[in-house]
Amino acid sequence: MSNVANKACKECSFVSDMDACPRCGGETSREWQGYLVIIDHTKSDIAKRMGITANGKYALRVR
Ligand SMILES: [Zn+2]
């Protein structure tokens, strides 16, 4: 139950504890699986592929 306090944005997958995404203002959900941490989005191919333009923690799948 390590993810119980975290929510992921349905729009951009950014993980936070907020009801609204602090990055894009989108709705967040507790129903998400897996995550990746982007430390330097300018050097990450995954970040480019997912359209991630800020460092942080992102869910791989949000329901
Ligand atoms: Zn968002």
Image: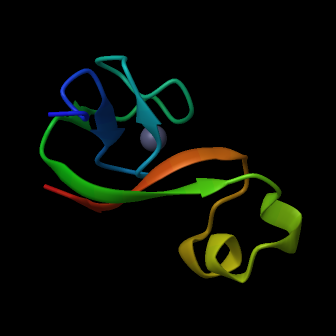
What residue is rendered at 48% in x and 52% in y?
A: 58
Residue 40 sits in which quadrant?
bottom right
Q: State how many labels appear.
A: 0
Q: Is residue 7 above or below residue 36?
A: above
- The quarter of the image holding the C terminus is bottom left
The x, y position of residue 6, in whole percent, is 30, 28
Left or right: residue 25 compared with residue 34: right
What residue is rendered at 61% in x and 69% in y?
A: 51
Q: In this view, does 54 lie above or below 35?
A: above
- The quarter of the image holding the N terminus is top left
Residue 44 sits in which quadrant?
bottom right
The x, y position of residue 47, in whole percent, is 66, 70
Q: Which colour scheme is used?
A: rainbow
Q: Is residue 5 above or below residue 52?
A: above
Left or right: residue 22 compared with residue 10: right
Q: Which residue lies furthest to the right in this view?
A: 42
Left or right: residue 38 compared with residue 6: right
Ligand 1: give its quadrant.
top left
Residue closest to the eye, 2 or 14: 2
Residue closest to the eye, 52 or 56: 56
What residue is rendered at 72% in x and 82% in y?
A: 45
Residue closest to the eye, 58 or 52: 58
What residue is rendered at 27% in x and 33% in y?
A: 27
The x, y position of residue 18, in whole percent, is 36, 17
Q: Residue furthest front?
A: 1
Residue closest to the eye, 17 or 52: 17
